[in-house]
Every structure is written in structure tokens, then in C-alpha cells.
Image (spheres, helix red, strand yellow):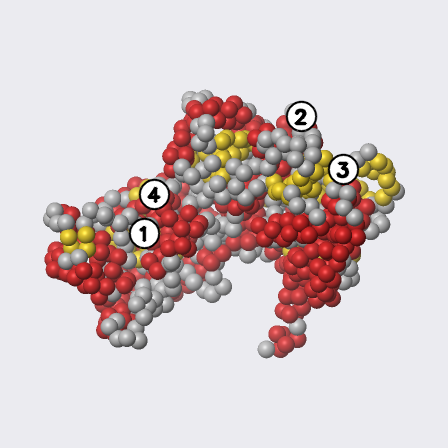
Amino acid sequence: MELTLWTYEGPPHVGAMRVASSMKDIHYVLHAPQGDTYADLLFTMIERRGQRPPVTYTTFQARDLGGDTAELVKRNITEAVERFKPKTLLVGESCTAELIQDQPGALAKGMGFDIPIVNLELPAYSKKENWGASETFYQIIRTLLKDKVNEIDKINPQRWKSLGRRPKVNILGPTLLGFRCRDDVIEIQRILSEQGIDTNVVAPLGSSPQDILRLTDADINVCLYQEVAETSCEWLKRNCGMEYTTTIPIGIKNTINFINEVHKKLDLTLTNKEELEHKSKLPWYSKSVDSNYLTGKRVFIFGDGTHAIAAAKIAKDELGFEVVGLGTYSREMARQVRATAKNLNIEALITNSYLEVEDAMKKASPELVLGTQMERHSAKRLGIPCSVISTPMHVQDVPARYSPQMGWEGANVIFDDWVHPLMMGLEEHLIDMFKHDFEFVDGHQSHLGQTATNIPDNKKNQDEQSNVNIKENKSVLWTESGKAELTKVPFFVRGKVKSNTEKYAISKGLLEISDETLYDAKAFFG
Amino acid sequence: MQALKIGSKYFMSKVELNKEAGPREVFCGLTSIVWLHRRMPDAFFLVVGSRTCAHLIQSAAGVMIFAEPRFGTAILEEKDLAGLADAHEELDRVVNDLICRRPEIKTLFLVGSCPSEVIKLDLTTVAEKLNKRFLGKVRFVNYSGSGIETTFTQGEDGALKALIPLMESTNDKKLLLVGTLANNVEDRFKKIFNNIGISNVESFPPRQSTELPKIGKNTKVLLTQPYLSDTVRDLKHRGCEIIYAPFPLGVEGSTKWFLAAADAFKINELKVHEVIAPLANRAMQALEKHTGILRGKKLFLLPESQLEISLARFLHNECGMELIEVGTPYLNKELMGAEINLLPDNTKIVEGQHVEKQLDRVRASNPDLVVCGMGLANPLEAEGISTKWSIEMVFSPIHGIDQAADLAGLFSRPLKRNQILKSETLATF
């Protein structure tokens, strides 16, 4: 039993719903009690979808349990097939139905329908949402393609040459409720088509069972989100020899690496190598003098595996930040996240508990947090700027404008989204320069909004916020000169200077902190 | 024409009662934790359930939590089900951790869920044991908010029913308002009752879980919410007298509600009118700007909160809307009798749901406004049908005469917005 106050991922059948809702001509009969229908609002409210998810819930009740719930399942399947006329039917159960073991998938298969039926067994007590999405996508592909893969020859990625056509790829992994998937797909298709590469099928997002049957027409697969598509890509590789890409095209370097990988796999010559460096504004914006102040900014990163790893690489190599924390809630990707962290000389945090993440964030005292919506809240409480880089989705993560994370435009979006929450370089200097002027209001907030440091105490005590105050160290005293000097430190680093100085004083066994101690500490920490 | 048994008397009503079964699109009782934990800030709600339960509550609770919440889920894992771990011991451990972490908790609700009910986890026994161990520090009560037994607001019914055994007995004469109210509404009600001449007025649930009202044979219970069937039954067993009345939504409902209370306390009707008349006049003026938009518009209510019948009565009688269909997840004829009496002839009430067939009827009847759950709202809007999400009714202060215009505003706003967005000015720019 695990105490959970808030969870990054839903149950695995929500992952199945993400796949089903992303596709066309598919219906999902979910053996589940009433209440589980809440999952519809994730799509209709958060994604603002104008269609209901294609899901029929059996909504069994306590009084049905004494009787024949299997009959109830069959009735719902019959009605759903008649009403929605799907080309493929998914049948599965949520956590409660798993316990009563009606085996709805097996029931459906015995009902004599002439459409493919995908039996989804998603263990709700050990697995989570992303795993459920991955398994569902894989089961759909396996069910629809298992006969076909036995008939066709192994797919040579370079066969496009002998077939006398342009190379074709599938883009696998994007789903509804995936972070900026809608726009990533457009960006990646644009990048590929610039290289003379066609898109065969995008799936699950926007695809139909008919499209899944066409997957084997492509030369290779692009695995866009490992969390959802890696299992499927592996199966297609094993069964039809289809190669797939492993580079995730987030950030300039990895977008270029991705383009190279695609070319290498297809044995296609890359003709516009020099151009690629100038496709995005990120490299120049990062080099321009105002960005000097970004150097060594301490950044704390937490999110799903794909986006957390990508963020760490961009932060370090493309923006010149110092990564002081890296973690993920995606246990399936723990190994890769640990490896990335090791390269940065830090230890990865693998957890489902947002309170653990908040603690780690506090300890790392970052200047910028890149996280999920929950880290945005934690960072707000701690007065640290934050940008959201990963699911779980919030209505704000589905912006009206084109806003990918991948490719060239994705890099532009990332530069803006990560840098704007920080104080702009010139602005930072100006505030420093004018802070002794009488017009200057101490605690000037630039555009950062109200931070935790200047929320009045009475407000802080409301809403259980008292437990987030950083504990004051009572063992060292600040002298008058020390206090006076501390007030001259710009407000936005004052908290850090204070705690560093106290840490320094304790380590040196000092009982008092004077102005000189403050400068000693400054010299010590650099 | 159908005969209804209301309390001990029969009465004739021309409403058309239908029952429907099939797939439903409603929240389960766990959702009521979202408002209950706000009402009683010294209580914690621990759901014993699955990841689905945890995900449901956080999704219904406005999708994000801004601080450490006063509700959580003890998520059952495979080893709990396989009997490798004694689920009762595991729950003990989780509760211990929780109480160490949140020492300010005074009452801990152990809330049963679909999976805990199906595996027959005995939360009553667990609560008894914990009560002994934490005697004097934390009280434990348990109830079920499972979707196999409860719909949405019925979770509150379960929680209140679970508190009744903890309420001490008294013979003091008092009026007990039962059902969660917004604090400002509760204060207004108490003031008005005072002016009417009923001074000993208490609320259940109280603002602090430890300040439970005492009850007994001189307690007269006036319901503020229609979904409290089980709570009412147990209050009756404790000797309380139930005052049957329409619910305090709108001017008419609230007036009749005050009158029913006054009648039970043998206070002259004229006194009530004297106190209420100025409020009612003011409220009816405020209502006008909404009724202008709502009058003559066709309304379809899908089932969810059990507030539907009272809302239909208000929106028809006071706002002039036409009722196409009034859905309700469950119909307690005894508690709803007074409301049904006030509905127009031939009102179609549907208890239960077959969501697909109901949506077919929605489309066929061409309504101007549909009251529905959040899962259905945007899809209906995309079809060109205006909607109002029903969950807002349980999160907003809508009770009482002073709130009548605000309540109407919840329904007029989507219609007004559509008028604005459809207007020529926008189209020509």
C-alpha cells in the first residue's frame, strides 16, 4: 500500500484511452464502475476536445456483482459495436473489474464479430498510465499486423532506392494528453519533408486501423516518444526488420543528430548540413551578449523520461546552465535518466512523490526549475521561476498557438519558455545599479510576479503553507553590520547568500556573522 | 397520472416518472471529498483504493493541488491483493505515517472505494482498532464513496451518516441544518432564522469536525441538500424530527423552506414574510436581468448531483425556462415530494441513465441549454448545444434568497456568452 497525495500518472487504462482517443474508427469497451467515467474530462476539458473519447463504460454496480456481470459486458459490447460501428474494438477493464475477473476481452472474442478485437490486459495494481499507452499501442499493432508480418519480406531501410520512390517513414508515439505532441508531429514532418523524406503514417495520433495496416509500407520508424512507442518499434523490428530511430529531436544538437540518424538508416545523403545550424534562433540567442547572464544558472529538472533527459542536455550544452538536479517519475526510463545524471555528476531522483521532488528542489536551491505543473506549484511556493516541460497535462499545456518542443521551432519555443521566467540580463544589472536610489522599491519583482519571499506572513500561514518555510538557522547570530550588508545584496539572491553565509559560518565554527563574514563566505563559495 | 407516496400521505402529481438503465456518465461518491475537506479543515480523507481513485479526485479537484492536500489515497498494490501483505496491517502503517506527518488532523475518514469494497476490506474493524490506539488524539470513521454504491453527492451522505454515532444526545430544542453549505450562506441563514425567531440553529457538517452538534428528540432537521437519504434515516433513528420542505434554491424554494421551519417551531407565517419580504423583493429584482435571457429557453438536465429536480423547479418557476427532461441519478420520493409538487404538469423525470440514449434525446429535442458533467460539456458545445457543467452547482454558494440571482447567473452566462460570440460585430471584424 502506498500513500499518495497526488500522482504524476493515471492508471494504465487511462493510457489505453489516450491511444484509443487519438485514433479514428476505434472503440474501447471498458469494464468499469461508474465514476471511472471521470477520465473523459481529461480529454474534453484539458485538451478541449470537441468529441467524447470513444469509450463505453459498463458502469456496473454493487447489485450487479451478485448477478451476471459477464452478461452486462456482452450487452455493452453489442450496443457499442452497433452504435459506433468501429473498425477495431478494444476491450479491457479498469482496476475494479480486474478483481472480478470477467475477462471481457475473451468474452468479446467469442461473440462472433467480424472486426479485429484487441484484448487489453493492463494490470492496474502494478502498472501506470504511460505503460498502459505503450501496451495498448503495441497490442493494436500486433493484433492488426500479426498475419501480415509473416507474409512479407524483411524490410530493408534502403529499399526506397530500388522501389524508385522517395524514402518513407512512420512517426510513432504521439498521443492526446502527450506534451505538445500535436505540434511536434507537424514540426518533425516539416523537417523530414525538407530532406525529401515522406511521412507514411503518424500513429496513434490521427491514425485509423487502416493506417496501422499500412505501417509496413514505410522504410523505417521514427520513435518520437519512447514511453509510448518503443515496445511497438521493437516488435516491428523483430518481426519485419524495420529499423527505428532512437534520437529524440529536442534541442538543436539532438535535432541535428536525429536528422543524421534518419539519413544514415535510409542511406540518404545529407546535402544541407551547414544550413541546419541556422534553422533555429536558439544558437544565436544563446550566444548573444544578453545571454551571458545565463552562464552557470542553476537548474533543477524533473519530468517524464523523454523530456527530462532532453532538458538536461539542452540546459547544459545549449544554454550553458548548470544542472543541479535531474529526476523522473517514469520508472521505465530510470536507467537512461540515471545515466544522464551520472554524466552531469549528480544523482538522479526516481520517484512518484511530488513532496520528495519538492524537498530535492529545496536542497538544490536552483535559480530555475524545469518540471511538470506540480513542480511549477512547488517552485512558486519557494519563489523560484519555473517553466513546464512535461506531462501530466494541464489546460495551459495545450496552447492555442503553434508551440512544439521538437525540432527547430521547438528549440525557439524552449529558449523563450525557459529564459523569460528568469530576470533578463540587462534588467538584472539595472536593478543592481539603481537599487540604492530612493525611488527603488526594495523587493522589486521585475516581471516575475509575487514570490514566496515577500508574501506576508499571515497569508503564508493560511492554506498549510507554513511547512514550506525554509527553517532559519538559530545557532548563528547576524550582527548589525552583517544585517546591513545583507540588505545591500539584491533581493533575488539574498536568500541564497543568507543560507550560504550561515552554512559557511557553521562550518567555520563561528557564532556571529558580520559584514566581513559575508564577504569571506562570498569568496569561499565563489 | 401517477400516484406518489410522500411520507405518510398520497398525492397526485402529473409528472412523468421514468427509469432508465445502461452505461452512465457520472462521478462516484469519492468526488464529494473535494468539498467536504474544505468544509472541515481539521479532517483528513484517506481513500483506500487504487491509482484510479487518486487520479479521479485530483482530476475533479480542479486538476491541480496548490499545497499538501487534506485528502489522499492508500493505493492498493499487487501484494495487498495477493495476500502477501495483510492489507489491514498495511493500512495501519500508512495511517501511522500520515498522522506523524500531519499531527494537526483531528478526524480521519477512511473512505472505501470500488476495489476495497470488492476485496471486502473491513474498514469498520480497522477504524475501531485505530480509534483505540489513537484515543483522545484522532478519531477514525469510515464510509464508502465507491462508484459501485454511490453517485457523486451520495459520498457526502455516507460521510455524514458515519459521523452520526459520534454525535452526543441532547434534549435541547434546536434547528439543525443538514448538508454542506458555503460558510457565508450558513451565516446568512442563521441570521435570518434569528430574525424569524429561531435562535438555536446549528449546522451539520460543522466547520470543525470535532464540533459535532448534539442531537435528540427535540432536534428538528431541515435539509439544505437533497441527496442525504441515509443521513436522514439515521437522524430519525436518533429521534430527530425531519422537516419536509422544498430545498432552499431560488426565492420560492428558500421561502417555503423558511416557512416549513417556522411552522415546525410554531412561529406565525406572517413573521416569516415580514423578515423575508424585503430580501425576496431585492432578489426578484436581481433575478430579472437573468430571466430576460432564460425565459422561454428549453432546458435539458442530465443526471449527476440529485440537485436536478430542485434546479428544474427554480429554472422553470422563477426563470421561465421550459423543461424538456429532468435527469436524476436517484430519486428519493419522500425527500423530493415537496419539490415534485411544485414542478409543472407533465414534467418528464428520468431516474438513472443510459448516456447514449439520453444524448440521442438531447439532440432530438434541440435544447437551448443542457446541464451535464464535464466529460460531456465540450463535445455538446462542439455540436452547437450550450451547456452548463453540473459540478459548479456543488462548488458555488447557490443556496438562499440572496444567492438566487447568482444561481440564475450560472445558467444565463453560457447563453449570454453565445449571444456575444454569435453577434454580427464579431463576425464582421
Quarter holding the N terminus of chain A? top left
x and y, in percent, of residue A482 in the image: 17, 59
x and y, in percent, of residue A270 in the image: 30, 62
Separation of marks 4 and 2 at Cα, in angstroms: 45 Å
Q: Secondary structure at mark 2?
A: loop
Q: Residue at x 18, y 50 (%)?
A: A476
- Nearer-N-terminus badge (1/4): 1
Task: Determine which residue is flagged by label 1.
Answer: A301
Q: Nearer the viewer, residue B386 or A482?
A: A482
The answer to whether any part of residue A82 appears in the image is no
Q: Nearer the viewer, residue A410 or A358?
A: A358
Task: Establish if B360 lies above or below B80.
Answer: below
Mark 1 or mark 4, which is nearer to you?
4
Q: Secondary structure at mark 1?
A: strand
Residue B334, which numbered label?
A: 3
x and y, in percent, of residue A40 in the image: 57, 47
Mark 2 or mark 1, which is nearer to you?
1
Task: Determine which residue is flagged by label 4.
Answer: A356
Q: Nearer the viewer, residue A518 or B316?
A: A518
Q: Residue at x 75, y 41 (%)?
A: B264
- On screen, residue B144 versus residue B318, left or right, reads left
Residues marked 4 and 2 touching at CB (< 8 Å): no
Task: Determine which residue is flagged by label 2.
Answer: A67
Residues marked 2 and 1 touching at CB (< 8 Å): no
Q: Residue at x 45, y 57 (%)?
A: A397
Residues marked 3 and 2 touching at CB (< 8 Å): no
Other residues around mark 4 within 10 Å, as few (<14) / some (14–19) / many (≥20): few
x and y, in percent, of residue B244 in the image: 75, 41
Q: Could you tell me the amino acid type at mark 3?
A: Glu
Q: Could you tell me the amino acid type at mark 2?
A: Gly
